[in-house]
Image (cartoon, grey):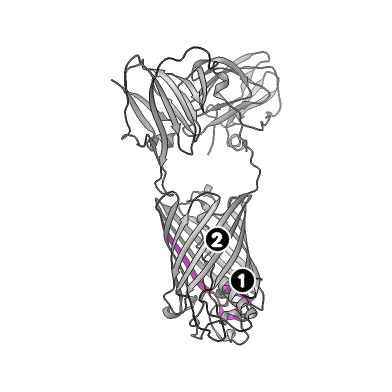
């Protein structure tokens, strides 16, 4: 499978339900609403930005709607171990829609139902084993237009092909700032080991991510665990399909109960129409109370090669 | 991966000693099972006299040679630029992996010099006779379409001739004395150095351009291109036809032509 369809960013959102750690109603809690006692919630603050898109957009919705409203949204992808080639720029647009989310306004937070959000991701290849990703989070909300919410930067390295490891291995770290009006946790950090393996028509990937808040109310809440995984099958040279799994287990030292964990399963397809393009489409369900029940996601990526290539190089 | 000329990486073997004014015949063979190579001798040119052991209708002087796996070139170099030079792969990363040998003039000293070409140049047609030369003999067509079969992104593809992989591929029957035309379409995204055992063929068409008189037994057919070769069935016995790219051959790109 072309590299582009394998590199990804797992992101989820705990849009409603209970706080994974303490059982507090979390509708809008991680949005940093002044009215919500976020610091009393023991849920990982870093996990907030691990679900950054949803929360960011939720925050925007709250601020610009004039009343606290809960929203659900996602940047939903599982990373593959490959990195973008040097002198290549990967431009991706993540689009997510929640056909069946929280329908009620709880604690003044907008419901996630029928919310749609976009994230722009730019990834530049440094060499044949490193890349840097940059994110622009925006929110589009009826009546409020497009708002800038925050940015993240994400360096990533991988085991070079010349090492001939049987399994793809890479390590991503991500640091991000988001405006305090959207989240009290303004600086967050994530480290994401990435393993993937291709056998015949089958593809497997695992992202056991760890998260931490650097600045904000949740700074003392320790490290959270938010794994992602993917399995897919090549039905043809162009069409692959399978499942993606996303979860937030809460603090790694004190996991939430299953009822309060985020658990999402997506049916996805990757369309390998060209090495220049990345197309990923999926529909996901969230069976736990802490998860939106139905999500539709799409990723459209285009690779731009700006290097000069000589036939003798 | 290390690449060598006569078993030695560039800088490790003995240099080839030459004298000014000599005309040196080089017989160059690409013995790589998988890689096409471009070869140049810095400061010099090659006068190509024969391809795959067959004299070419029009000897040409060229800056570099291109050799697909199993191809051979016989060329004369006039030693008219005293010094110490590199005979090596034109592509920088391939030469850096060792593919080269030092050509040293008598009484010359110093580090070997390399002059880097800017492009990769080769054209079979320049060595052929004019297409109008001679008359084409009647030949029986054997159409051969080359393609690959997807086996998953984690597997290598299977290679097919007319939709079948060896050993399930067709085995056309030849009649001794008759002339045959292999009309080949490379439908795949890979180049293929096709090779016919036990016979020498005449290249009659490359990419839609007619050729005459160029005799070979290996022909590199670029991706998505067509070529035709003709040969006379004059050597009874089972005759292997295959892609000389080892990975392709191993995964089905072979067929046997048999005599009726």
Q: Chain of mark 2?
A: A
Q: What is the distance, in whole Å, between disc 2 and disc 1 at their CAs?
A: 32 Å
> Are the two marked residues, 2 and 1, in contact with CB atoms closer than 8 angstroms?
no
Classify B139 as above or below A219: above
Kindly give the residue lying farthest to the left in the view shown.
B260
Local secondary structure at mark 2? strand
Q: Quadrant of residue B187?
A: top left
- Horizontal relation, residue B17 to residue A195: left or right: right
Q: Quadrant of residue A31?
A: bottom right
Which of the two discs, 2 and 1, labels the residue nearer the N terminus? 1
Neighbours of disc 1 within 10 Å: few (<14), some (14-19), many (20+): some
Give the magenta range: A211-236
Local secondary structure at mark 1? strand
Q: Quadrant of residue A222?
A: bottom right
Q: Chain of mark 1?
A: A
Q: Position of residue B118 (x, y in %)?
A: 66, 33
Neighbours of disc 2 within 10 Å: few (<14), some (14-19), many (20+): some
Is residue B69 visible in the rendered image? The answer is: no
B216, B45: nearer the viewer: B216
To which residue does mark 1 refer? A140
Q: Position of residue B227 (x, y in %)?
A: 47, 27
Count the numbered circles shown: 2
B223, B78: nearer the viewer: B223
**Quadrant position of the C terminus of chain A in the picture:** top right
Q: Position of residue B167 (x, y in %)?
A: 31, 34
A82, B22: nearer the viewer: A82
Give a yes or no on whether discs 2 and 1 share a subunit: yes
To which residue does mark 2 refer? A171
Classify A281 as above or below B50: below
Examine the structure image and report whether residue A226 is included in the region drawn in magenta: yes
């Amino acid at each position: 499978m072309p590299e582009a369809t394998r590199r990804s960013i797992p992101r989820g959102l705990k849009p409603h339900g209970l706080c994974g750690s303490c059982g507090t109603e979390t509708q809008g809690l991680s949005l940093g609403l002044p009215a919500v006692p976020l610091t009393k919630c023991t849920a990982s603050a870093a996990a907030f930005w691990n679900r950054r898109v949803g929360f960011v957009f939720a925050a925007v919705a709250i601020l610009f709607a004039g009343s606290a409203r809960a929203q659900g949204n996602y940047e939903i992808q599982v990373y593959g171990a490959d990195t973008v080639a040097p002198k290549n720029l990967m431009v991706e647009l993540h689009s997510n829609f929640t056909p069946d989310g929280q329908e009620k306004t709880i604690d003044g937070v907008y419901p996630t139902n029928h919310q749609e959000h976009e994230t722009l991701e730019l990834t530049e290849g440094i060499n044949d084993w490193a890349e840097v990703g940059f994110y622009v989070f925006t929110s589009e909300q009826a009546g409020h237009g497009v708002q800038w919410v925050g940015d993240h930067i994400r360096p990533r390295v991988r085991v070079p092909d010349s090492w001939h490891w049987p399994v793809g291995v890479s390590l991503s770290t991500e640091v991000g700032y988001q405006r305090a009006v959207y989240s009290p946790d303004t600086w967050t950090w994530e480290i994401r080991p990435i393993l993937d393996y291709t056998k015949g028509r089958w593809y497997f990937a695992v992202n056991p991510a760890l998260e931490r808040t650097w600045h904000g109310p949740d700074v003392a809440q320790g490290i959270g665990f938010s794994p992602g995984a993917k399995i897919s099958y090549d039905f043809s040279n162009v069409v692959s399909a399978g499942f993606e799994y996303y979860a937030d287990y809460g603090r790694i030292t004190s996991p939430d109960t299953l009822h309060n964990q985020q658990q999402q399963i997506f049916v996805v397809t990757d369309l390998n129409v060209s090495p220049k393009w990345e197309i990923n489409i999926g529909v996901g369900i969230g069976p736990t109370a802490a998860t939106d029940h139905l999500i539709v996601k799409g990723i459209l990526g285009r690779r731009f090669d700006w290097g000069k290539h000589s036939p003798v190089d | 991966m290390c690449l060598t000329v006569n078993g030695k990486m560039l800088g490790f073997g003995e240099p080839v000693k030459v004298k000014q004014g000599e005309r040196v015949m080089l017989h160059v063979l690409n013995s790589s099972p998988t890689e096409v190579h471009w070869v140049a001798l810095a400061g010099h040119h090659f006068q190509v006299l024969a391809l795959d052991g067959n004299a070419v209708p029009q000897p040409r002087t060229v800056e570099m040679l291109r050799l697909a796996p199993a191809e051979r070139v016989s060329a004369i170099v006039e030693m008219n630029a005293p010094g110490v030079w590199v005979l090596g792969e034109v592509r920088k990363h391939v030469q850096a992996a060792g593919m080269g040998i030092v050509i040293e003039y008598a009484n010359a000293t110093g580090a070997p010099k390399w002059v880097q070409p800017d492009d990769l140049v080769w054209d079979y047609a320049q060595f052929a006779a004019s297409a109008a030369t001679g008359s084409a003999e009647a030949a029986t067509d054997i159409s051969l379409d080359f393609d690959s079969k997807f086996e998953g992104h984690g597997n290598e593809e299977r290679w097919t001739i007319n939709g079948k992989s060896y050993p399930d591929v067709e085995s056309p029957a030849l009649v001794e004395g008759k002339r045959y035309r292999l009309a080949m379409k490379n439908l795949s995204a890979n180049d293929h150095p096709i090779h016919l055992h036990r016979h020498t063929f005449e290249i009659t068409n490359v990419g839609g351009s007619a050729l005459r008189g160029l005799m070979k037994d290996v022909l590199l057919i670029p991706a998505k291109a067509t070529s035709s070769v003709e040969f006379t069935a004059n050597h009874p016995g089972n005759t292997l036809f295959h892609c000389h790219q080892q990975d392709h051959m191993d995964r089905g790109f072979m067929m046997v032509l048999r005599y009726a």
